Image (cartoon, rainbow, N blue to C red):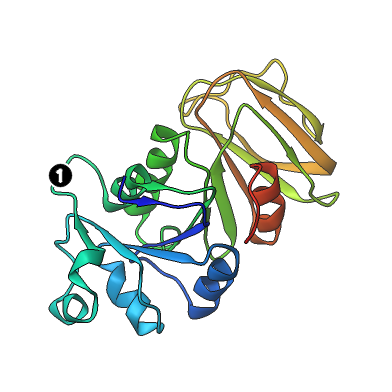
Amino acid sequence: MIVDTMENVTLLGAGEVTAATLAEALTLAPNLVAADGAAAKALSFGHLPTAVIGDLDSIDGASREKIPADRLHLVAEQESTDFEKCLAAVSAPLILGVGFMGARLDHELAAYNALVRHPDRRCILIGPVDICFHAPPELLLEVEPGARVSLFPMAKVTGRSEGLHWPIEGLRFAPDGRIGTSNAAHGPVRLEFDGPGMLVILPRQALRAAITALGAVAT
C-alpha cells in the first residue's frame, strides 16, 4: 500500500477537469494523489500532490523536478491502467476521482472496469455532468423526487429497490442484456444487490448523497 490514510483522498487523472471541480473535490477529500501524468495538471492548478502513482511513462521532466522524489511511486507492471494502479495502492475512507470521465472514451470505460475490479474501494468518479460509483450490497440514496438514477451492470446482477419509478426486483441485469439507465426517484431510494458488478450513475448534484450512501464522511 503506497498511500494508507484515514483522510479522504482526491485522485486526479489526466483527462478533462476544471480547477473548480478539483477544488470541490479537495474540500471533501483534501489528500491529493495524482495518477502519473496528471501530476502536471495538479501543479498547473497550484497543488503539490502527496503522491504520484503509475508506470511514470507520462510525467514530464518539469513535473519530476518540482515533485520530491519520495512522492514518485513507480508501479512498473503494464497489465493495468494508472487509475487501477492507484486504486490498488491507495487505502482511504473515500476516494474521489476527477479527470477520469468525459475525455477519451476508452480511458473512461477502463475506469469503470477498475471500479468493478476493486469493489472494496469506496470510490466515486466525478464528471462534468454525472458521478459514478460501484454499488455496495445495500445503499440508501437520499435524493430528491424526480432525480435521475441510472444503473449500469458490468456483470450479471439481480437486486431489489424501493423508491424507484421502475422497480428492479425480478430483473436480471447484464452488460449485454437488460440495463437500468434513466430511472427516476420518487424520493429516497433503497437498493440491494445480490452480488458485485452494478454501477450507479447520478447527477453531479447528488455527490454528497452518494458519499453518505457509501457510509463515508466528507472531511
Which is nearer the eye, 194 or 175?
194
* Camera-nearest residue between 180 and 27: 27
Name the residue tied to disc 1.
78
Amino acid on which disc 1 is placed:
Gln
Say above or below: 45 vs 152: below
Q: Is residue 20 found left or right of 68 in the rendered image?
A: right
Position in image of residue 50 (x %, y %): 35, 67
Residue situated in front as seen by the camera: 37 or 107: 37
What residue appears at the point 52 percent right and 61 percent down from the top-left corner? 127
Q: Is residue 64 above or below residue 115?
A: below
Task: Give residue 209's position: percent from left, percent from top.
Answer: 72, 51
Q: Which SS class for mark 1?
A: loop
Quarter assignment of residue 150: top right
Tell me: 195 left or right of 215.
left
Looking at the picture, how far across and down is residue 49, in whole percent?
35, 70
Q: Residue at 45% of width from left, 58% of height from top?
A: 101
Query: Dot 1: few (<14), some (14–19), or many (≥20) neighbours within 10 Å?
Result: few
What x and y, as percent, mark residue 173?
A: 57, 23
Which of the 4 quarters of the picture holds residue 73? bottom left
Q: Quadrant of the C terminus?
A: bottom right
Image position of 83 with respect to 155: above or below: below
